[in-house]
Amino acid sequence: MGRDLTALFDPRSVAVVGASDDPAKYGHAVASQALRAPGRRPVHLVNRRGGTVLGRTTATSLTAVGEPVDLVVVSVPGAGFEAAVDEALACGAKAIVAITAGFAEAGPAGLARQRAVAARVRAAGAVLVGPNCLGIADNTTELYLASDRFAPGGVALLSQSGNLALELQLRGEPHGLGFSRFVSLGNQADVTLVDLVEDCARHEATSAIAVYAEDFGDGRAFAAAAAAAGKPVVLLTAGRGTASARSAQSHTGALTTSADVVAAACRDAGIELVRTPREMTVVLAGLAGLGPGPRPRGRRTAVFTDGGGHGAVAADAAEDAGLDVPELGGPTQDTLRTVLWEQSSVGNPVDLAGMGEQRPLSYADTVGALLSADEVDAVLMTGYFGGYAASDGGLGGGQNGGSVLAEGEARAAKEIVAHLTVTPKPLVVQSMYPQSPSCRVLAGAGVPVFAATEDAARALAAMTGGTARGREAADSGPGVPPLPSAAAPLADPGYHGVRALLDAAGVPFPAAREITDEAGLLAAAAEFDGPYVLKALHVLHKSDAGGVALRLADRDALLAAYREMHARLGAPAYSVEAMAGLDDGIELIVGVNQDPRFGPVALVGLGGVLTETLRDVAFALAPVPAARAEALLRGLRSAALLDGVRGRPAVDVAAAAAVVERITTVVAAHPEIAELEVNPLLVRPDGALALDARAVLR
């Protein structure tokens, strides 16, 4: 059930320690907000100098309040912080909101202080938000302990940035977005992002959870909590750079960036990942248009327009957002022809071709026909709608009978709402006049209305699970895979030790023997027939260093290659292997990288020596079930190669996916392995074979 945060969001009483009459101090802002609902619960202001604050008599200490206090806000200088927390706990506080800064963000000494305070709070059975936070608010319980007001609504906002929270509030206002809760995360010394997501998931008044976070703490637990929330989670995060790859020691590490890991976790957990505050607002506005309940699944989108240009642009935007814009079938086109005129286009996009100026109700008739079509999952309406009511002159005025068109457009808006009541499918509108009376009718009924085409398409993708991320999760079963029990640590991280580890898990390899001299080489060659492969061991990127010799036809060729390679590289050991047949095969890469926030993260993609050049890879939290692995492989840019091109046969993708599951499961059970990769994994029409493997320990 998660932690009990009742005292944090619905306390019986509140005290603000550090309350002040000085507008420059945060204790003034919090105290002002706390007093907005004096009838809901007792609010005590504490200032060590006494006197009055905001016209209220203050107590000189929490002890002087004379009664237990459920929640205490601490906004005092850092030197007095620990004493304030200890006094709050002694007075029976069950929740503390720590505004005071100067802890983990200030260095090791501050981190040690922070950990000690958090331990005391937990030992007392209390909870702590912060330190270094900007407060909390809960509109459903009239709890106002942040410097800014948040319009009431259904979004719980959990943010590490106060300014971004304010921007989201401002951007959301035109769309009617409001907030059930706001929590400034601070340093998450005790109450974590995971705790808050779990609690907001149980909060009936919260319909969606919006998160801005740079520090996820336990990122895997966050993803699991979001996956289990049962309501949309929208994430905005920073740090999409490549700095995390600079010290990588393998292809897998070099191909994995922080952004890749976060994107993989979001896809697996069904989280809507956004890049900017504007995109977060767009997604939240779209989700708000759905109302309560699960999101409908289906990305077959009908684009409806009153101008060819708008329709073409909207169709492109919809496909860019991950939606499908298929040609409508014959029966649907026939139905549309009964409500449109001859020159209208009914294929998809559906274009009124000027009929709206003659009969504004054609907008509603067309939307109704599209919503009723079984082959249509969602509708994107784009163009001039709203302009007839908004315009006093020009088109919609003067000789065109502006008032008549405006009245007709207003009736059309009401009929569109009526059609949605009968057939409640996702509908999003892009309008040149989003603030017009007609568009406000739609917005008032919960239809998201945007000025930008790309915003409308992105919102619709969020409403339908139509993004590429949402499609992959739906196709292969969304969710965060549980980690297997830890296995005994890998004793031999060398090449043959890693091969043995994977071989025991059912990963197929060609026959191979490790050798250190010519006698061992000849003995190995006698155990299996050529052609042979010779590899220099303990050499990073063997192919680049000339440490791999292929297609050695017999023992004489093998011996000659060994002598040349050993003279040049002087490697301490070599591997003699049976040469696999490369004809009709595709080389893949499978790797796992241990991320400090999200745990083991898998990479699959096009492999071989050009892996880092082509960068055609996909990511997922490990272990990766075979069905998920196959979906990732099918989603690669080069996926067509798997099904055979230019006369080549299709390869056994299911066999490759099964090997991916085995590899990623093994590494997930070995947390001491920082990176492991199999490159290449040769996939042929008759199965899959691992040709090379290496591991890097922590």
Image (cartoon, grey):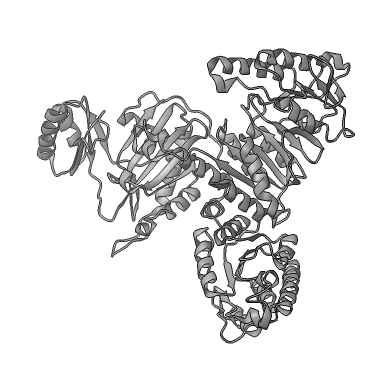
Left or right of 316: which side holds 184? Answer: right
Left or right of 176: which side holds 477? Answer: left
- Quadrant where the C terminus is found in the figure: top left
Percent position of residue 545, x then y: 20, 35
Percent position of residue 666, x then y: 45, 35
Instruction: Place residue 45 in its image quadrant.
Output: top right
Above or below 5: residue 175:
below
Above or below 456: residue 183:
above
Tell me which residue sits at (60%, 71%) in the image: 375
Left or right of 654: which side holds 334? Answer: right
Above or below 235: residue 322:
below
Above or below 495: residue 396:
below
Tell me which residue sits at (85%, 19%) in the image: 68
- Residue 270 at least partly seen: no
Percent position of residue 239, x then y: 49, 38
Q: Pick the residue in front: 54 or 287.
A: 54
- Residue 423 at least partly seen: yes
Instruction: Place residue 329 in its image quadrant.
Output: bottom right
Percent position of residue 384, x then y: 61, 71
Q: Pick the residue in front: 526 or 418.
A: 418
Q: Pick the residue in front: 32 or 652.
A: 32
Tell me which residue sits at (37%, 49%) in the image: 616
- Quadrant where the N terminus is found in the figure: top right
